[in-house]
């Protein structure tokens, strides 16, 4: 009986260790799952609390200028990302549309807008509006003047200070700003968007099918 009793004790201890290890694994899985949910919902999303946040609603007036001619407003896409347009000459930043970190903080940029616009191409050196010709840096405007792509942003749509960018992902969409996406010859004048007055009532075009112009 003594020998049988001594053999059972190690078995029970091993079972307790196995049970403890299983519990630790389950707790770790649950913790990782909680982190994943927090990331998808907005907690600790990696944007460093930089605005725009989940519930912000920002607007920038924009225009596309090809060889000196302002193009029609881009249409509202069928599927909205958190950075989109309503065919009103404005970029709308609404992260709550998707709830994604891709529409918040520094991710709320021009590249994100382009991602959600079918048949619109924009890179550091080329542009193509829906139904239009693909224009690459060096292609000529007016037959003899090579053009180049410039992304000009006025942080304050009413102000005169601006910054020129090359990469769409470097252009964060700001509230109350103006942006002209221009393909023009070197040194050509780049005008502000004609849609700036729409900033006074930026929600007027939402869901109303604003006509192009």
Image (cartoon, grey):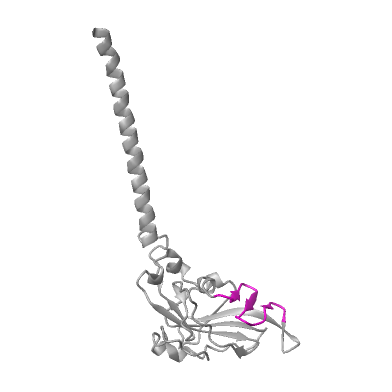
**Foreground of the two, 64 or 73:** 73
Looking at the rendered image, the quarter that the N terminus falls into is: top left
Tell me, yes or no, whether the highlighted magenta stretch contains residue 132.
Answer: yes
Tell me, yes or no, whether the highlighted magenta stretch contains residue 112.
Answer: no
Q: Tag count in the figure?
A: 0
Residue at 51% x, 91% y: name it.
194
**Foreground of the two, 4 or 189:** 4
**37 shown above or below 31:** below
Residue 52 showing in the rendered view: no
Q: Position of residue 104 (x, y in %)?
A: 42, 68
Magenta stretch mostly in which secondary structure? loop
Q: Position of residue 61 (x, y in %)?
A: 48, 84
Residue at 42% x, 60% y: name it.
46
Q: Position of residue 210 (x, y in %)?
A: 46, 88
- Quadrant in the rendering for residue 54: bottom left
Q: Which residues are magenta?
A: 118-139
Outermost residue on the left side: it is 1
């Amino acid at each position: 009986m003594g020998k049988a009793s001594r053999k059972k004790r190690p078995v029970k201890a091993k079972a307790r260790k196995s049970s403890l290890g299983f519990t630790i694994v389950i707790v770790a899985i649950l913790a990782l799952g909680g982190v994943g949910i927090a990331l998808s919902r907005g907690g600790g999303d990696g944007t460093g609390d930089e605005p725009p946040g989940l519930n912000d609603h920002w607007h920038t007036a924009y225009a596309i200028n090809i060889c000196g001619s302002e193009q029609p407003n881009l249409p509202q896409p069928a599927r909205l990302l958190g950075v989109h347009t309503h065919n009103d000459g404005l970029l709308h930043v609404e992260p709550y549309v998707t709830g994604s970190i891709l529409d918040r903080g520094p991710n709320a940029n021009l590249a994100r807008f382009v991602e959600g616009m079918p048949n619109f191409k924009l890179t550091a050196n080329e542009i193509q509006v829906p139904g239009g010709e693909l224009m690459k840096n060096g292609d000529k405007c007016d037959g003899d003047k090579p053009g180049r792509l410039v992304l000009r942003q006025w942080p304050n749509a009413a102000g005169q200070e601006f910054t020129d960018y090359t990469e769409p992902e470097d252009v964060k969409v700001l509230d109350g700003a103006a942006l002209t996406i221009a393909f023009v010859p070197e040194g050509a004048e780049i005008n502000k968007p004609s849609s700036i007055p729409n900033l006074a009532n930026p929600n007027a075009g939402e869901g109303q099918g604003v006509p192009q112009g």
